[in-house]
Image: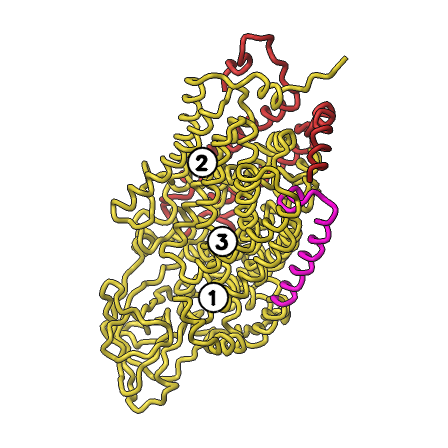
Chain colours: A red, B yellow
Amino acid sequence: MTNSGQQPTEEAPLEYDPFFLHARREAVIIFCIWVVALIWAVPFCYYNGYAIDDPVNIPTTLGIPSWLLWGIAMPWFLADIFTTWFCFWFMKDGDLVHPAHENSKAAPAESQEATS
Amino acid sequence: MSWTPVLLGADSGTAVLWTFLVYIMGVFFIAWLSSRLLKGRNFLNEYFLGSRGLGVWAFALTLAATSSSGGSFMGFPSLIYTHGWSLGLWIGSYMVVPICVMGILGKRINQVARLSESITVPDILRDRFRSVSFGLIAVGLIVFFMSFNLVAQFKGGSEILRTLLRPIEAFGDLAGSLPDWATGLSNQGSDYLLCLLVFGLAVIIYTTYGGFHAVVWTDVMQGVVMVIGVIIMLPLAIYQAGTVIQDTQEPGIAASTTSRLESVTRRMATMVPPRKGTATFTLVDPKATQEQRVLPSGSWIFVAGEEGASDRLFKIAKGYKLASGSTSLVAEDQNGNGKLDKGEDRNANDVLDPEIWEIVDLNDILQVRKRLEKRTEANNLTGVFALSDISVRDYAYGAKPEERGAYVTGPGPHRDKVDGFLPLSLAISFFFMWAISGTGQPSNMVRLMAFKDTPTLRRSIFTVAIYYSLIYFPLVIIFCCARVLIPGMESEPDRIMPQIAVELTQNIGMGWLAGLLIAAPFAAVMSTVDSFLLMISSGLVRDIYQRNINPEVTEKKIKRLSYLFTMLVGLGALLGAMNPPEFLQYIIIYTGSGLASCFLAAVVYALFWPRSNSQGCIAAMLSGFLAHLSLYLVGFLRGTGFSAYRLYGMDPVVIGLLVSFVVGFVVTLLTAPPPRDLVQKYFCKPKTEP
């Protein structure tokens, strides 16, 4: 996404809705978290869980193969902690439809009901 | 604690039947309640979107249950059983699926849907860009993909129901009593047809009658059933698998839950995959009774080993019946021709393919012996057969000495693929598949349009994250334990879920619980089917009829059309599923990844990029579709059937998404910016009068 979107025409610059800007920021952060999860889980599991020298005596933690515990289970736990923080401390609430939009919609909505 | 294993028999079958009946009654009750809600509200908004009023539990569980199709509770367990611990990596991206699927698009798609008063995904795209053609392309793609998927899901639901009800004698009698003209409607057998009719009609009726709210509330019920099932099974599976090992070879090791799981992993580390092949079965006594001429499905046969060697153990994958007068089943595989249907009489010299599995792991053989002695394992073989011309083949990966430990390491054993179940490229692909492809599913997007407010979204993401954590990784543990508890299920891996549910609960004297646990997969597939059904009918009624053919249609007529189309689409899928096409599983994969390749880039640009325009987003949608389709066509031309060509080993969804995002971006920049008033409407605060 480029800054060219800031000025679709040559008129006065548009002032974006802070709700939209924050939603976009949240989406970018979530995508980054997915990338982090991918970069951690797949290489870690590949280097520690594939082509092991002595698989019969594979290292385990809590009864689970260690490569899977540290590669998937532990990051899963951390992902849940991150999700909790993200949902309750980072994400911002807001009106899904601004009251002014509601007002501007009121008249056509009424006329539509009248026709049906 | 001591326990006595019992068979999946009449008692458990009755429990399953009662659970199923109670469950269906609950579903119809919910549909009735939902239909009452429809009165006095805007019909379309309520019928297809629940009036955008979903609270935390309804929103969270409907999304979770819709995403967890029958595959989560039948296919996934069978994969764990077949390939071992590597399924932990396969499902690993579910750690971020809730936050990705709900968090990336949730706020914006809900906001834009409200601004444009959209009810469907094509609605949003059409209004966001004021492009009728974009809306029609979108609805065309949804109907195309979803119709195939719906047929496949109907078949999946029927297969699950057949698996669950098969042990019940009354079910077999009822299926057998269907008239010839009815059984002739399907090439899958009378029991399949009966299950399809029960499953299909139930879903069609409650979805048609109750609309979106019925679907959501049944999803909530189904979601609760699923998580309770897993929570109950986890400690039982670890305890009982540990006890099996403790009782057989390693006393003292299984003192705590952790060390019981440890002992399961240690056992799995030494496991050797079974072999698959064919053999000639010869009846030893030519005067055997008709009953003794039957080779029941799932029967075990021990064959004396050569001098000094231990006995060989075989399992018959499919059941056969010898015609009277004949004494042998000739095992010749001639490209699959002349396959014998289960239980069908044929002459001895017919070309057959009596599939057999040889268990080669010594611990597994010991466990099967014990289960047969304790009558935990059914062996209905009454006749005495001799096996000759045994031809069995090792797994392509996992059987060689240097590949030992395949069940506890990557890439996991595989019968046909020499690079194993989950090579690195596929592990990466599945990270895309679940989290990113899931974000691009229109069925999830519709749900994101229905939540009430942003606090609901936040709490729902958290709820689904906990919900998935309680389900997916525990399922890996449960079905790794199942490998130890019930060896030899590779011949019918889809039955491992009901089988383990029954064994775990009956072993602790609570067989009635089995019905509840077994309802989970059925609930999962039902919740997926009803959502897809509603998506197709909403596309036809809202996006095509109301918005293009007759915009002035009255609410009364819309109501009739919605009921009619939902019912017709359902009946069409039911008819299609009577004789389902080949490569059905591949079709499910194709449609899921195809929808993501088409929709994700277009919707992301539409929601987050003010500069985006209709040309760019249509290009993103069509290029994703064509890139994805072309990989399947290349695969088809290379002779791999409906299996896609994997460029650099990657799943087509990765390539499809990449092409879609790049093409959409380039075309947008090469074409004119969107009208200022559109950007103002969807990206800026409305101007307020002073």
- Rendered location of residue A7, percent (x, y): 54, 12
Q: Tag 3 or tag 1, which sits nearer the N-term?
A: 3
Compared across the picture, whether B235 is left or right of B157 comes to right
SS at circle 3: helix
Q: Tag 2 or tag 3, which sits nearer the N-term?
A: 3
Residue nearer the viewer, B37 or B416? B37
Q: Pointer 3 and pointer 2: residues touching (CB < 8 Å)? A: no
SS at circle 2: helix
- Rendered location of residue B474, percent (x, y): 56, 52
Q: Around disc 3, counting alpha carbons within 10 Å, would you say few (fewer than 14), some (14 to 19), or many (20 or more)?
A: some
Q: Which amino acid does label 3 sit on?
A: Gly
Q: How far apart are marks 3 and 2 (CA)?
A: 23 Å
Pointer 2 and pointer 1 on the same chain: yes
Answer yes or no: is residue B499 visible.
no
Which residue occupies 29% across, 78% down? Answer: B346
Q: Which amino acid does label 1 sit on?
A: Ile
Chain to which mark 2 belongs: B
Answer yes or no: is residue B209 visible.
yes
Q: What residue type is labelled 2?
A: Cys
Residue nearer the viewer, B354 or B176? B176
Stretch of the chain drawn in magenta: B20-48
Compared across the picture, whether B390 is left or right of A57 comes to left
Q: Quadrant of the N terminus of chain B?
A: bottom right
Q: In which quarter of the image is the C terminus of chain B?
A: top right
Q: In this view, does B373 lie above or below B106?
A: below
Kindly report which numbered mark, 3 or 2, lies closer to the viewer in this rendering: 2
**Numbered badge on residue B486:** 1
SS at circle 1: loop
- Rendered location of residue B269, percent (x, y): 42, 55
**Numbered badge on residue B71:** 3
